[in-house]
Image (cartoon, rainbow, N blue to C red):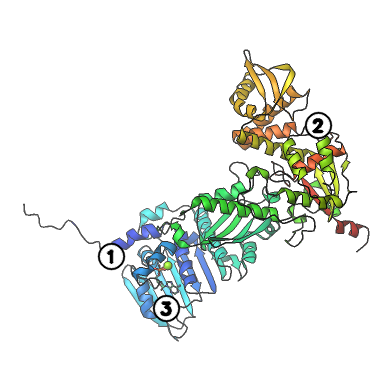
Amino acid sequence: MTDTTNRIKILPENISNKIAAGEVVQRPASVLKELLENSIDAEAKNIDVFIKAAGKTLIQIVDDGNGMSESDALASIERHATSKISTIDDLDAIRTFGFRGEALSSIKSVSKVEIKTRENNNELGTSLSIDEFGVKIEKGNFPKGTSISVKNLFYNTPGRRKFLKANPTELKHITDTFKRIALSYPSISFKLWNNDEIIFDFSSSELSGRIKQVIADNIFEGIIEVEEKTEFLNIIGYVAKPTFLKKSKGEQFLFVNNRFVVNRTVNHAVFSAYSHLLEKGEYPFFVLFLELDPQNVDVNVHPAKMEIKFDDEKNIYNFVKAVIRKSIGQYDLVPNIGFENSENTSTILKQENEEYVTKGDFSDRPNSSMNYNRNENKGIYKEDEIDLLFSNINPNMKKEVTNSNSKHPFEDNVYQHSSNISDENSEQNSSSFLISLHNKYILSPIKSGLMVIDQHVAHERILYDKAINSFDVDIPFSQQLLFAEEVKLDPADYDLLKSINTYLNQLGFELKFKKKNIVVINGVPSDVKSGFEVETLNGIIKEYRINEEEKHLEERDNLAKSFSCKTAIKAGDKLTEQEMRVLVDQLFATTMPYVCPHGRPIIIKIPLGEFDKRFGRT
Ligand code: ADP
Ligand code: MG
């Protein structure tokens, strides 16, 4: 055997660069990301981006940062050239920020790159034109900073060029990347031109101002500020108000240590903080910045991957969920309604008419304090907080409720709750009252004006929470019927009931499935009005089907919604004052008293100032 050929070859640099480029540069947006990050690292205050053909023919970034000397500029395009890591100790920086000194060398291997750059203390700047034949260097009078143009991306790798998507898709990737970076550096001003038309112009701003610029002005009325600082983790940002969920497009921005990332744990924590307000497939809007020791974050070193993992996902989950809940609870979520709008119900619900109530305005509701161990089903408010909130309508409750023989879904809670009412509360406002408006709305004077509660949706919220709770604790509470009811169903409904019978059972239904599609109702949840057992069951089946087909709700959520909708008192049902009190109190013991499970408001508030205005007192 005289095989002397070397089988192992060192790859020529241009080939290894192309391979590296496959990792770093996947599409125009990835070039944009790398170049923007370089400009930010160079301390630029103004960054202008020019795009042509969705970045396929041109991506140019012009910054006013530190610039580069001629030798640095030449070095910058070499593989593993970086000014950001020099010793092995800096290697952790790779883990945290992903500096690999590979961006420019990769980009230049798959496109034609031109760099014009000048440092502040140099009068003359340097221009480099780079293509497959080499580098052309020129000196010139350039503005301070760096301009890098990347032309004809993938011109020499047709396979990759073919892989690119149509312009609208690539442009979407570009604008997404641009927005994410702009959000994480609000003090830098960013502009983006697409085919000579300016599409984003973000002036230097605070985070809140940048959010307005990036997300759209009008969303600001519908979002809540989030801020919590601990030794372990800081979190700041904004989330959608529960009353705004349906109207806000669910865009999510998560930044960890100021880098845009994707993490399912955080997404899920935010989602669950809204306590059953969201349906499967719906996501709340949020912009959140988490800050924690980079040692506790596992950033994928792959430059194009955005998924990260936390060492302690469980703690992060609990923390984020608690903070978001607290933030939701800290705001006055009750829409303030002016009379001008009262004729048109559709405008009432529009967020534009909702007054943005700041943290200072807590004349009639308390701050909720953070409590990580709080029982989920107890809601976001502590009981004394609820009492305080409704101090002016609660005073007589204890006596009345304990004397009452009527059945209430949360009977036990009501007793507990009432016994907590402090003496202090019972002293004030003993004359306050609840009034029914057309057996539809409950009116109640509160310190800041008049509160109006929709009785049907209020009850719906109470029953919904109760249903969800009963699935979790699994101790059915059933009301036995004196005379069992028999219903003949159509076969499909019969099968449906059979398939969800476990859950129906947990709610308190006791059904027996006989032959010939006959169902015997032996017991029902205590909330079902007596004499209406069959009607209610049929209503639930109907509603369940609608939810299933239109909203693709998950079984339990669907049943809880169908049940609460069909069992709740209706608009037009007459309530005694005592029943109204119980309803109001139970409402405030739920997880989310302001919004019904379908996202409709439960309570609105007419501020005293509104009355003053109407009566010419101001
Ligand atoms: P990395 O950012 O990982 O260091 P890059 O290939 O992206 O690697 O950049 C290489 C080097 O080029 C950077 O470390 C920096 O010194 C220099 N550089 C790149 N872009 C700019 C810029 N816009 N302004 C100043 N220096 C830059
Ligand atoms: Mg870089």
Residue 68 numbered mark, or none? 3
**The C terminus is located in which quarter?**
bottom right
Which amino acid, mark 3?
Met
Name the N-terminal-most of marks 1 and 3: 1
Residue 587 numbered mark, or none? none
Decide if residue 227 is on the left or right side of residue 303.
right
Name the N-terminal-most of marks 2 and 1: 1
Residue 13 numbered mark, or none? 1
Quarter occupied by residue 378: top right
Q: Position of residue 318 (x, y in %)?
A: 56, 51
* Residue corresponding to mark 2: 406
Marks 2 and 1 sit apart, C-alpha to C-alpha, by: 84 Å
Which amino acid, mark 2?
Ser
Q: How many dots with numbers? A: 3
Q: Residue at x 65, y 21 (%)?
A: 511
Q: Residues within 10 Å of mark 3 (few under 14, many from 20)?
A: many
- Is 429 or 542 nearer to us in this picture? 429
**Is the CB of mark 1 within 8 Å of ligand 1?**
no
- Is 583 or 548 nearer to us in this picture? 583
- Is 132 or 470 nearer to us in this picture? 470
Q: Residue at x 35, y 64 (%)?
A: 109
Query: Vertically, is 428 above or below 544?
Result: below
Question: Considering the numbered disc 2 on the image, is that residue within a helix, a strand or a loop?
Answer: loop
